[in-house]
Image (cartoon, rainbow, N blue to C red):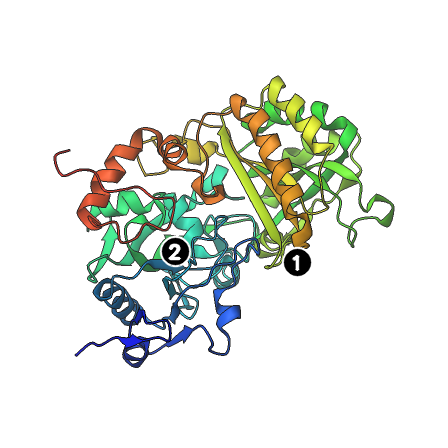
Amino acid sequence: MSTTTATVAGTATPPYAELAAALHGEVITAGDAGYDEARAVYNAMIDKKPAAIARCRDAADVISAVRFGREHNLELTIRGGGHNAAGHAVFDGALVIDMSLLHSTTVDLVNHTVRVDAGCTWSDVDHATVAFGMATPSGFLASTGVAGLTLGGGIGYLSRRFGLTVDNLLSADVVLANGTFVTASESSHPDLFWALRGGGGNFGVVTSFTFRCHDIGEHGTIIGGPVLYDFADTAEVMRWYRALLPSLPEELSGWIGLITIPPAPPFPEELWGRKSCAIVWCYTGAHERAEETLAPIREFGSPLVVGLQEMPFNVLQSAFDALYPAGLQWYWRADVFTEISDAAIEVHCRYGAQLPTGHSTMHLYPIDGAASRVPSNGTAFAYRDGGWAGVIVGVDPDPANAAAISQWARDYWEELHPTSAGGAYVNFMMDEGPDRIRASYRGNYDRLSRIKRRYDPENIFHINQNIPPAPAHT
């Protein structure tokens, strides 16, 4: 029989010892050793104090945690890699379903697939696949969690050639809000599968993913790296880049950003701390065609650094992990852009000159090529008509700078937003309200809301970029 115990304050506390006894993993509550470490997320600006953290070891543990949360009317959050910009992995007073112990990968060389547990990071996946000369599209940091990035869509170095992460998702194992377990794919729960491909954590707790893999480069070796230009050349570089990128073969992709050159090797010491317009390139095609393909890049302008070189794909994927470790202060603002307009370039130049800290930056990530050939209603991820996912991030190690970096990002976004397509890549969003969420799903929002009604009618999973269930009559 389930019971509750009374705390000193006289409030009812769920019997977490009973949950702990039901799990192969562990339950951590306030006062336990490791509690502060377990509740910490990538963005140190988030400081939430959940009631308990259920560190699950398998899908059965997840089922037990979901059922326990329902039985005791608890707020539930889902933690994968903990990278979420808004910190939705944790919430005051909630039960956190922590997937970090679900950590295995299985590569199928015959079918060119990889099965990935929901606690993995992309570093784990790349380690498993690149050894065989393969990869599946992911993001731009290897420390990012597989689950969160995938469920939001998945924009990365391989998107121009192979599509978004969700375009390569073949199936997902899911614990639903009622505590049942299903596998979603094109042939099983197809509506749920459609919604998972960009709809975030609204529809259940995914415990594992199966992805299609692709041969890349020469046995997993690509040609890539940064090309850095003087900040004074930003407008010229951006105009050149916006015209060049759509004409490039899809084996070559590059994101553009405004940065402060890090004060560390391999960057030349005389450039440390200098503001720059940067493009980070990734070429995954045959190396005998690389010289011709990369010639337009090598020949343009007067770059400060041309860092293009052969490397395993996972080296490029992890290149910025050391620069952005967990525990920094982050404030994010984002939009999708169908073009890099002259008006936008003027805003970029003005606010790039004001980068408030060495870690603060602006990036524009391409959504074109294979990613743009999927119909806008083909998955929940709606922005398929080409362009870029833009993100402005104020970042610094010092909490004393949190207000300054946040204000810079807000001001930058306010002036840039009128040049955007209206919505954002949900993985880059803070808590910005229902109108922003609806704008980010465009015409797919109403279908998502109906699927939410079917799979989570009580909105159990709502600490996310939430899509409430549609009313019963719609």
Residue 439 screen position, x and y as percent:
38, 30
**402 left or right of 203?**
right
Residue 58 figure quarter: bottom left
User: Which residue reaches farthest left?
Assistant: 473
In which quadrant will I find the C terminus?
top left
User: Which residue reaches farthest right?
Assistant: 270
- Label 1: which residue? 322
Residue 162 screen position, x and y as percent:
45, 42
Q: What's the residue at 48%, 34% (across, down)?
A: 367
For badge 1, the amino acid type reads Ala
Q: What's the residue at 44%, 67% (across, down)?
A: 100
Residue 42 screen position, x and y as percent:
54, 57
Q: What's the residue at 42%, 31% (across, down)?
A: 372
Kindly tell me whether residue 187 is visible in this rendering.
no
Task: Give whichever of 115, 452 is nearer the camera.
Answer: 452
Chain-order first, disc 1 or disc 2: 2
Label 1 crowd (10 A; few <14 / some 14-19 / many >=20) = few
